[in-house]
Image: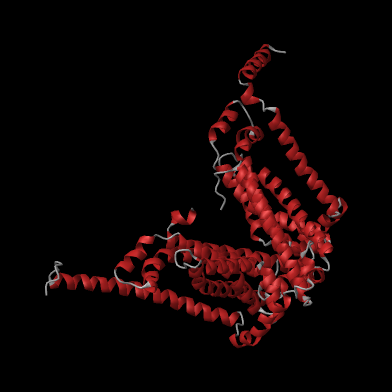
C-alpha cells in the first residue's frame, strides 16, 4: 500500500486539484475563444475572397500538370540539344537580366544617397528642427508604405515604358525603407564626437560630416547592400507593368503559357538572386563583422 | 593675417605634427577610397548609358508627373466609394486567409524540417529545399501562375500568398522549433510521455508565442502585398487601382492610395498591440 512517497492530506489535495482545474478551464476557454474568433473571421473572409474548395479541387490536376509542363524535357541522349532548346533565348534573357541588376543598382544608389543625406534631418539627436524632422519622417513613411509596384504603374504612365520608371519606383520605395533604417542608425551614434564638433562652433553640416558620418558609414553601406538584394528581386517584378527588366518576358511567358520559358527564366532569376546574395553577404560581413542586420 | 588667425594656424601645425596618424589617412586607405568611389560612380554612369536613360525623358516625365499630381487634388471617390470599400475588404480577406492557410500548412512541415524533431537529414534537406523553392519565387509570380490555373479573382490571390508564405513560415517556424530548450521535452518523456505528447506539452508552449508573433507580422506585410497582387488580376484593391491609373482618373487613384495607407496603418497598429500582448514589449522590439 505505501509507495514510499509522502502524500498530502485529502483536503489539501482537493483544493489543489480544484485550483488546477480552474486554471486549465480558464486557459481552455481562452483558446476556444481565440479559435472561435479565427474561425468566424476565416468564414467571413472566404465569403469575401470567393474561396471555392470544389473549384480548387477541380483545378488541382491542372495545377499539378502545370508544374509538370513548365519543366523542360531533358533526355540524356541529346542533353546539349535539349538545353539549347530550353534556353533558346539565353542571350536575350541574359541581357534583360543584366538590365534588371542595373535597375536595382541605380535605384539603390539613388535611394541610399538621398536617404543618407536626409536621415540626419530626421534623427532626434542631430536634427536641426523639430518640424522639419516630423516632415521628413512622414515622407519616409509615405514612400515605404506605398508599394513599389503602385509607383511603377504611375511612373510608367508618366515616363513611358522602360527602365526609368522602374528605377524611380524602386528607388522611391527604397528611399523610404532606407530612410527609416538610416535614421535609427544615426540615432544610436556615440554623441562625444558630435559634441566635440559642436563645441568648436561647427554647424549642422559640419556635425554631420565630421561627427556623425564617419560613425554611420559602415552601417549605411551594409543596409544599402541588403536593400540591393531586395531590389534585385523587386526589379525582376516591375517588368510586369512595363517598367523594364526581365519581368516583361516572364509576364508574357506565364500569360501566354510558354511553359518551358517560364522555368528557364525563373531559374535564371533565382540563380542571379542567390549569386548576388552571396556576394553582398561577403561584403557586408567585411564592412561590419559584428553588426546584426535584421 | 590677424594675431588670432596666426595663433590658430600655429596651433593647427602643432596639432597636425603631433597627431598626424590620427588626422591624415595613410595613402593605401585613401587610394582604396578613391577607387571604390570611382567604381561606384563609374558603374552608375555605365548603367545610365546601358539602359538608355536620358535627362530629356526624365524632364518630360517629371512634367507629366506634375500634371498627374495636379489631377490628384482633391482626392475623390468618383461615386465608387462602395466599390472601393468592397475591394479593400477583399484585400484584407485575401491577406488574412492567405496567412492563415500558410500557417496551417507550414506548422507540420516545420516539424519535419527542424533538427530536434526530425532525425533524418535527408528528409530535412528535402523539406528545406522545398521551402526555399516556395520562398524564392515572388508572391506576384505565384499570383500570375494561379490566375492562369484557377482563373481571375481573389481566390488566386489567396493561393499565391498561402503558397509563398508557406515557404517563409516553414523556415521561420523550424528555426523557432530548433531554438527551444531540450529540458521541457525531456521532462515530459521522463514522465512517460511519447513523442507526440512531448511535442504537445514540451515544445508547443515554447514556440507558440513566437509563432503567433511571426504570423501577425506576416499578416501586416501581407496586407501590403495583397494590395498589389490585384494588378495581375488576383483580386482586391490592386485591380481597381491599376484600372484607375490606366484611365488617368488620378483623383480616384489618390483616394485609393490614401485608403490603403489608412488601412495599413490601422492593421499595423492592431497587430502591433496584439504582438506586444502575446510576447511582451521588450521581445517584440528586439
Q: Is residue B251 left or right of residue B52?
A: left
Query: Residue A158's spot in the image, x, y percent?
Result: 81, 61
Image-quadrant location for residue A212: top right
At horizontal 59% and vertical 80% (from top left) the residue drawn is: A48
At horizontal 59% and vertical 71% (from top left) the residue drawn is: B95
At horizontal 31% and vertical 75% (from top left) the residue drawn is: A25
Q: Nearer the viewer, residue A32 or B37?
A: B37
Image-quadrant location for residue B192: bottom left
Query: Residue A186's spot in the image, x, y percent?
Result: 58, 42
Q: Nearer the viewer, residue B237 or B228?
A: B228
What is the quadrant of the N terminus of chain A in the image? bottom left
Q: Do we see residue A192 in this rendering?
A: yes
Q: Is residue B6 left or right of residue B124?
A: right
Image-quadrant location for residue B141: bottom right
Query: Residue A294's spot in the image, x, y percent?
Result: 56, 53
Q: Nearer the viewer, residue A19 or B253?
A: A19
Query: Residue A85's spot in the image, x, y percent?
Result: 82, 71
Amino acid at each position: 500500500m505505501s509507495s514510499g512517497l509522502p502524500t498530502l492530506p485529502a483536503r489539501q489535495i482537493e483544493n489543489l486539484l480544484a485550483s488546477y482545474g480552474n486554471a486549465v478551464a480558464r486557459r481552455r476557454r481562452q483558446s476556444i475563444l481565440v479559435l472561435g474568433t479565427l474561425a468566424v473571421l476565416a468564414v467571413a473572409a472566404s465569403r469575401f475572397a470567393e474561396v471555392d474548395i470544389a473549384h480548387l479541387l477541380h483545378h488541382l490536376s491542372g495545377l499539378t500538370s502545370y508544374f509538370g509542363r513548365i519543366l523542360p524535357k531533358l533526355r540524356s541522349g541529346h542533353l546539349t540539344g535539349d538545353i539549347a532548346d530550353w534556353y533558346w533565348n539565353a542571350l536575350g534573357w541574359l541581357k534583360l537580366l543584366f538590365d534588371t541588376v542595373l535597375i536595382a543598382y541605380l535605384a539603390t544608389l539613388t535611394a541610399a544617397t538621398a536617404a543618407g543625406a536626409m536621415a540626419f534631418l530626421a534623427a532626434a539627436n542631430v536634427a536641426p528642427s523639430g518640424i522639419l524632422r516630423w516632415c521628413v519622417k512622414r515622407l519616409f513613411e509615405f514612400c515605404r508604405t506605398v508599394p513599389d509596384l503602385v509607383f511603377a504603374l504611375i511612373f510608367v504612365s508618366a515616363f513611358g515604358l522602360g527602365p526609368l520608371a522602374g528605377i524611380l519606383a524602386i528607388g522611391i520605395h527604397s528611399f523610404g525603407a532606407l530612410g527609416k533604417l538610416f535614421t535609427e542608425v544615426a540615432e544610436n551614434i556615440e554623441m562625444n564626437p558630435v559634441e566635440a564638433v559642436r563645441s568648436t562652433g561647427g554647424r549642422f553640416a559640419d556635425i554631420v560630416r565630421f561627427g556623425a558620418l564617419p560613425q554611420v558609414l559602415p552601417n549605411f553601406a551594409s543596409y544599402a547592400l541588403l536593400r540591393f538584394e531586395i531590389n534585385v528581386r523587386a526589379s525582376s517584378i516591375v517588368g510586369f507593368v512595363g517598367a523594364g527588366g526581365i519581368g516583361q518576358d516572364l509576364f508574357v511567358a506565364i500569360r501566354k503559357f510558354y511553359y518551358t520559358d517560364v522555368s528557364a527564366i525563373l531559374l535564371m532569376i533565382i540563380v542571379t538572386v542567390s549569386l548576388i546574395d552571396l556576394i553582398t553577404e561577403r561584403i557586408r560581413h567585411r564592412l561590419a563583422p559584428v553588426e546584426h542586420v535584421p | 593675417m590677424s594675431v588670432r588667425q596666426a595663433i590658430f594656424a600655429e596651433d593647427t601645425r602643432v596639432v597636425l605634427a603631433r597627431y598626424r596618424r590620427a588626422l591624415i589617412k595613410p595613402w593605401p586607405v585613401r587610394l582604396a577610397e578613391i577607387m571604390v568611389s570611382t567604381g561606384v560612380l563609374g558603374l552608375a554612369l555605365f548603367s545610365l548609358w546601358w539602359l538608355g536613360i536620358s535627362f530629356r525623358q526624365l524632364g518630360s516625365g517629371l512634367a507629366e508627373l506634375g500634371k498627374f499630381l495636379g489631377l490628384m487634388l482633391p482626392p475623390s471617390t468618383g461615386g465608387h466609394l462602395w466599390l472601393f470599400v468592397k475591394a479593400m475588404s477583399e484585400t484584407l480577406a485575401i491577406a488574412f486567409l492567405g496567412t492563415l492557410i500558410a500557417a496551417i500548412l507550414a506548422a507540420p512541415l516545420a516539424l519535419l524540417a527542424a533538427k530536434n524533431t526530425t532525425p533524418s537529414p535527408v528528409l530535412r534537406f528535402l523539406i528545406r529545399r522545398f521551402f526555399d523553392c516556395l520562398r524564392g519565387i515572388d508572391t506576384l509570380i505565384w499570383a500570375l501562375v494561379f490566375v492562369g490555373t484557377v482563373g481571375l479573382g481573389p481566390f488566386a490571390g489567396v493561393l499565391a500568398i498561402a503558397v509563398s508564405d508557406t515557404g517563409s513560415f516553414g523556415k521561420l517556424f523550424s528555426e523557432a522549433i530548433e531554438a527551444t530548450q531540450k529540458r521541457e521535452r525531456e521532462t515530459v518523456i521522463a514522465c512517460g510521455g511519447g513523442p507526440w505528447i512531448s511535442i504537445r506539452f514540451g515544445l508547443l508552449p515554447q514556440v507558440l508565442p513566437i509563432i503567433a508573433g511571426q504570423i501577425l507580422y506576416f499578416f501586416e506585410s501581407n496586407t501590403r502585398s495583397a494590395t498589389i497582387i490585384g494588378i495581375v488580376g488576383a483580386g482586391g484593391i490592386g485591380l481597381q487601382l491599376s484600372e484607375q491609373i490606366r484611365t488617368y482618373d488620378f483623383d480616384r487613384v489618390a483616394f485609393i492610395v490614401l485608403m490603403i495607407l489608412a488601412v495599413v496603418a490601422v492593421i499595423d497598429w492592431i497587430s502591433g498591440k496584439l504582438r506586444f500582448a502575446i510576447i511582451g514589449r521588450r521581445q517584440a522590439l528586439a
